[in-house]
Image (tube, coloured by chain):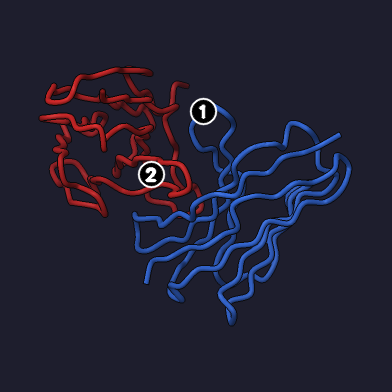
Amino acid sequence: NAGVTQTPKFQVLKTGQSMTLQCAQDMNHNSMYWYRQDPGMGLRLIYYSASEGTTDKGEVPNGYNVSRLNKREFSLRLESAAPSQTSVYFCASSGDRGDYGYTFGSGTRLTVV
Amino acid sequence: GEDVEQSLFLSVREGDSSVINCTYTDSSSTYLYWYKQEPGAGLQLLTYIFSNMDMKQDQRLTVLLNKKDKHLSLRIADTQTGDSAIYFCAESINDYKLSFGAGTTVTVRA
């Protein structure tokens, strides 16, 4: 049981380059999320998808786009990377039961130089 | 409001109890959660409490909820070196959104 799988695990980009972070879940969850984690700031929501076919902005959406490709997959795209986007990115998913909370992937550590 | 606050650091001696505190602002939160993050890993759900409960115990973990003061705590009994991690408090904002605190780094010393 893989849960939530993120790729890649590590990435170094030059300023201005683009890339897509991939996320897939095999738990038949309706909702998926992208967070970034920065020291001392906890987790900040970038975008989320409450159900297949819908996406919404979170707290810090600027510089990012997302695609909910199907129920399993939710990708995050950086069109023109900036050093301020250096962070650890986490994908998460959740089902219909609140007591299960979120299931997180293991993260992508992104450095923009 | 969606602010969740927790202290940033806690140092505890092996075998002692750890208490991690959290305050939240949304009185309509249905669930409150504690997550654990070990180095280089994602967040793992440790435990949760439903908003109509005052206390929940799960082996070494005890969660206390004071709804009047919007205060949540996590007590870890007999703290072990494997408990060294970052602990995040989170509240449910609606059916599918959570708001997380900044995390408390717990260091267990011998």
Percent coordinates x, y for residue B97 in the rendering: 35, 55
Q: Amino acid at mark 1?
A: Ala
Q: Quadrant of residue A30?
A: top left
Height in image: A10 above or below B74? above
Instruction: Tell whether B1 sits left or right of A62.
Output: right
Instruction: Tell whether A24 sits left or right of A77.
Output: right
At x 54% / y 55%, what residue is drawn? B89
Percent coordinates x, y for residue B77 in the rendering: 82, 49
Helix, strand or loop under label 1: loop
Q: Colour of chain A?
A: red
Residues marked 1 and 2 touching at CB (< 8 Å): no
At x 70% / y 60%, what residue is drawn? B56
Q: Quadrant of residue A79?
A: top left
Percent coordinates x, y for residue B99 in the rendering: 41, 57
Q: Amino acid at mark 2?
A: Ser
Percent coordinates x, y for residue B49 in the rendering: 59, 60
The quarter of the image holding the C terminus of chain B is top right
- Residue B41's disc number: 1
The quarter of the image holding the N terminus of chain B is bottom left
- Residue A94's disc number: 2
At x 31% / y 17%, what residue is drawn? A11
Q: Colour of chain B?
A: blue
At x 19% / y 24%, what residue is drawn? A20
